[in-house]
Structure formats: structure tokens, C-alpha cells
């Protein structure tokens, strides 16, 4: 089976669809390519990918802001990420997290 190559119009539609919120699996089905092909095209074009782990630099910044008392929502907004993504990254990094009322969790 030969790999399908996307033309310029299809690539533009793929990017537009991804930026509109369509996930990579659905785009892969729509354009009859592998999901990794979709990801590679988006990366090649510099399109920021959703649901990617935070970089070490971002985790360090988030940790600093969190220990200064910033709420997860504000950190997420600053990093352009979902607060849950930030929470997971901080938890994985071993940061002691606060509960919804700002109290340390034990």
C-alpha cells in the first residue's frame, strides 16, 4: 500500500479543520491518511498541537507561579493551556497541590 500525499488544498483544509477543533483521528479518516501523517503535517507547518505535555521550562514556570499563589486557571491562561493540564504536570512534578479552597492537600 502506497502512502497518500496530500496536496496544498488538502493540507490547508487539514490545518483549518484542526484549528477549528477537529481531532487528529477524525482528520486522518477524512483525508484517508494515518494520524501520524496529520501530526507531522501540522508540526511541519508550525501549528501548535493540542493536548501536548508541558515543556520542562513551562513546568518550572508553572511551579514558580503556583507556589506564589497563582490559581491554576491563571497559570493555564498564561501558558495557553487547560488548567487540568497544568494540574497534571504539577502533580507529576511532585508539587504539593492546594484544594479548591486554597488549602494544602495532604
Image (cartoon, helix red, strand yellow):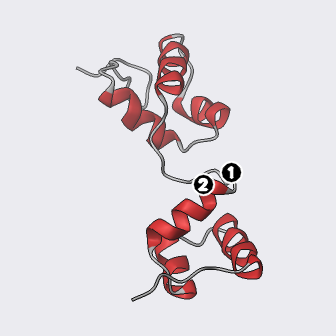
Between the residue at mark 2 and the residue at mark 1, the CA separation in whole angstroms equals: 5 Å
Nearer-the-camera pick, 19 or 2? 2
Nearer-the-camera pick, 71 or 55? 55
Q: Which mark is residue 5?
A: none
Q: Residue 50: give x, y in percent of width and height.
A: 55, 54
* Callout 2 touching callout 1 (CB < 8 Å): yes
Q: Residue 44: give x, y in percent of width and height.
A: 64, 55
Name the residue at the left extreme: 106
Pointer 2 local density, CA inside 10 Å: few below 14, some 14–19, many at least 20? few
Nearer-the-camera pick, 75 or 61? 61
Q: Is residue 103 left or right of residue 32?
A: left
Which residue lies at the image location 57% right of the left edge and 20% below the top edge?
Answer: 70
**Callout 1 secondary element:** loop
Numbered label tally = 2
Which residue lies at the image location 57% right of the left edge and 85% below the top edge?
Answer: 31
Vertical comparison of 22 with 54: above or below: below
Which residue lies at the image location 62% right of the left edge and 60% below the top edge?
Answer: 42
Nearer-the-camera pick, 76 or 71? 76
Name the residue at the front extreme: 2
Vertical comparison of 1 with 104: above or below: below
Q: Residue 6: give x, y in percent of width and height.
A: 64, 79
Q: Which residue is mark 1?
A: 46
Q: Quadrant of the N terminus?
A: bottom left
Q: Which residue is mark 2?
A: 43
Q: Residue 79: give x, y in percent of width and height.
A: 62, 33
Which residue lies at the image location 32% right of the left edge and 18% below the top edge?
Answer: 96
Vertical comparison of 41 with 74: above or below: below
Pointer 1 local density, CA inside 10 Å: few below 14, some 14–19, many at least 20? few
**Callout 2 secondary element:** helix
The image quadrant of residue 43 is: bottom right
Vertical comparison of 74 with 53: above or below: above
Q: Quadrant of the C terminus?
A: top left
Amino acid at each position: 500500500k502506497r502512502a497518500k500525499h496530500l496536496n496544498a488544498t488538502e493540507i490547508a483544509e487539514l490545518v483549518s479543520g484542526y484549528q477549528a477543533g477537529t481531532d487528529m483521528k477524525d482528520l486522518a479518516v477524512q483525508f484517508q491518511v494515518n494520524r501520524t501523517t496529520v501530526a507531522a503535517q501540522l508540526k511541519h507547518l508550525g501549528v501548535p498541537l493540542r493536548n501536548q505535555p508541558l515543556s520542562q521550562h513551562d513546568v518550572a514556570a508553572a511551579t514558580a507561579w503556583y507556589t506564589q499563589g497563582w490559581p491554576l486557571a491563571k497559570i493555564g491562561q498564561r501558558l495557553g493551556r487547560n488548567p487540568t493540564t497544568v494540574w497534571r504536570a504539577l502533580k507529576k512534578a511532585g508539587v504539593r497541590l492546594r484544594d479548591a479552597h486554597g488549602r494544602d492537600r495532604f
